[in-house]
Amino acid sequence: MIENSSFESGHSIRKLAVSCNMDSFGHSIGQSPLPGDPFWHQVLDRILNIADKHCVPITFFVIGSDLQDVGIAKRVKELNQLGHEIANHSFSHPQNFGLLDSATIRNEIALAHNLIAQCTGMEPVSFLSPGWNVNPYQGSILKSLGYSSDSSYFPHFILQLALIKMIQKKVIDRLQGRKTIQYSYREILSRQDYLLPLLGVEKWLKLKGLQKEVPLLPMENGNKIFPPPYWFTLEYFSKHLAQSSFRNFCKTGQKYLVIHPADFSDISDVKSIRSYKTNSLGRMDIGYKKYLKLFEERLLNLKLHGAQFTRMRDLND
């Protein structure tokens, strides 16, 4: 059943985007690009079936190294031809992105930028850092490449809880004798943006001596501590928290809905991959079908209450 939520009174048409952080399965097991990656094939088809059915364009933030696979590059070209946006999610998705030096950051952004441009014939203009891990050099680099939006900022404590969840999974994997996720504890914890939830984006930039080089699209929720910004993966962790977050999403200025391919996948998708047990991404142990249906209901709910879906690159128009 579609939840009876509505936009705050006074809102008419509201532009919203769907941001798909296309973290591939190959990346999650340290094998990007992975030929036949299920996230880029059967899982992507599930997302597209709903998007096409309801005429919702999606912005896909792509890991550049995945485009080195011919099959994945073909799918990305198809997405672009269908009118979806192909955006930059770095070349190798380093979890310690925030601590990398200027030359490395430029290489990460530029390599992915060039691969996307070669694949689609269009230069990307939207960027999202790996794990919303902000690097002080990225703004000036994005500006030099002509980017018009950066959605890397996540000024809420829920992100820190997600990092704790990653560490917890790493510990459990080791206790169970399974190969753990490829990130080290240091990489998971190595961030420069822990003060973002306390300061907000403007004050944090000032503290770091930085300026807005390109328009920012932070994950904000009306400056509230509770509930957190709506992020579809929350549906797997707490039904009540996710419902509260979605109601707030309908009432406040959050401009986009974030999804991941792992939200709509389960172990059956990866059983043919020899190394799938190295990282089931936690929520993949749960059946995806009810969450796929819920995603469709969320989109319908938003459309019924005035949402006009667009691409991330158009939100600042």
Image (tube, grey):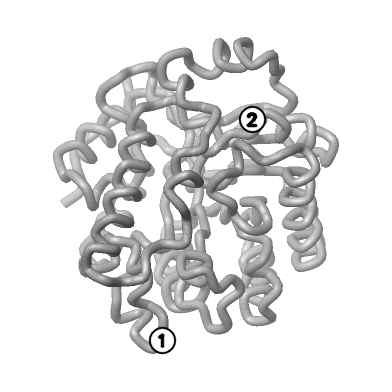
**Residue 260 showing in the rendered view:** yes
In which quadrant of the rendered view does residue 147 lie? Answer: top right
| Left or right, 159 with reference to 60 | left
Question: Residue 316 shows which numbered tag?
Answer: 2
Q: Quadrant of the C terminus?
A: top right
Picture layout, residue 255 above or below residue 237: above
Query: Of residues 205 and 56, which is closer to you in this image?
Result: 205
Picture layout, residue 226 above or below residue 19: above
Question: Is mark 2 in CB contact (under 8 Å) with mark 1?
Answer: no
Image location of residue 255, percent across then percent down = 48, 33
Picture layout, residue 44 above or below residue 245: below
Graded by Cα atoms within 10 Å as few (under 14), some (14 to 19) or many (20 or more), the crowding at tag 2 reads: few
Alpha carbons under labels 2 and 1: distance apart = 44 Å
- Tell me which residue sits at (45%, 39%) in the image: 189
- Tell me which residue sits at (73%, 43%) in the image: 105
Q: Judging from the image, what secondary structure is the residue with disc 2 in?
A: loop
Q: Residue furthest right?
A: 144
Image location of residue 123, percent across then percent down = 79, 52
Query: Of residues 199 and 311, which is closer to you in this image?
Result: 199
* Three-letter amino acid code at the position of disc 2: Asn
* Three-letter amino acid code at the position of disc 1: Arg
Query: Of residues 196 and 43, which is closer to you in this image?
Result: 196
Picture layout, residue 233 above or below residue 175: above
Graded by Cα atoms within 10 Å as few (under 14), some (14 to 19) or many (20 or more), the crowding at tag 1 reads: few
Q: Which comes sooner in the sequence, label 2 or label 1?
A: 1
Number of marks drawn: 2
Image location of residue 18, percent across then percent down = 48, 47
Question: Residue 46 shows which numbered tag?
Answer: none
- Tell me which residue sits at (60%, 37%) in the image: 98
Question: Residue 274 shows which numbered tag?
Answer: 1
Q: Judging from the image, what secondary structure is the residue with disc 1 in?
A: loop
